[in-house]
Amino acid sequence: MAEEKLKVEKKEKVHIFEAWCKRCGICAAFCPTNALGIDQEGLPYLAYPEKCTLCKLCELRCPDFAITVREREKKEKG
Ligand code: SF4
Ligand code: SF4
């Protein structure tokens, strides 16, 4: 478990502000790819970074603005 969390922090695709998070689980419930998990303390974390599409639904759904998703890599436009 702790190892997974460390991996997530390194990747930082999704960042959870623990102080603001009320552990309601909405973000994980709405994640369309089930990329988010809930740890033993009820805190969400990116359990499967490879599944995260950076869709930002978790960020939009969080009532406490406790989760932010990194911007997509800038795409080159033609
Ligand atoms: S950005 Fe989308 S895919 Fe990634 S964790 Fe949030 S809801 Fe899930
Ligand atoms: S929706 Fe927001 S407050 Fe609820 S568990 Fe997710 S990050 Fe925490």
Image (cartoon, rainbow, N blue to C red):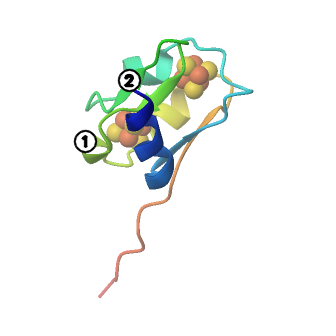
What amino acid is at disc 1? Answer: Lys
Label 1: few (<14), some (14–19) or many (≥20) C-alpha neighbours in 10 Å: some
Disc sitting over residue 76 in the figure? none
Give the residue displayed 46% in from the left and 30% down from the top: 45
Which of the marked residues, 2 or 1, is nearer the chain's N terminus?
Answer: 2
Q: Is residue 36 above or below residue 68?
A: above
- Cα gap from disc 2 to disc 1, whole angstroms: 12 Å
| Location of residue 4 with respect to 69 vertically, above or below | above
Residue drawn at the location 25% of the way across and 41% of the way down: 51
Residue at label 2?
Answer: 37
Q: Position of residue 72 (x, y in %)?
A: 42, 62
Q: Does any portion of residue 69 appear in the rendered image?
A: yes
Q: Quadrant of residue 20?
A: top right
Pick out the residue farthest to the bottom: 78
Left or right, 50 with reference to 72: left
Which disc is residue 51 wearing?
Answer: 1
Mark 2 touches mark 1? (CB < 8 Å): no
Q: Quadrant of the C terminus?
A: bottom left
Quarter the N terminus occupies: top left
Residue type at tag 2: Gly
63 to the left or right of 60: right
Q: Position of residue 52 (x, y in %)?
A: 32, 43
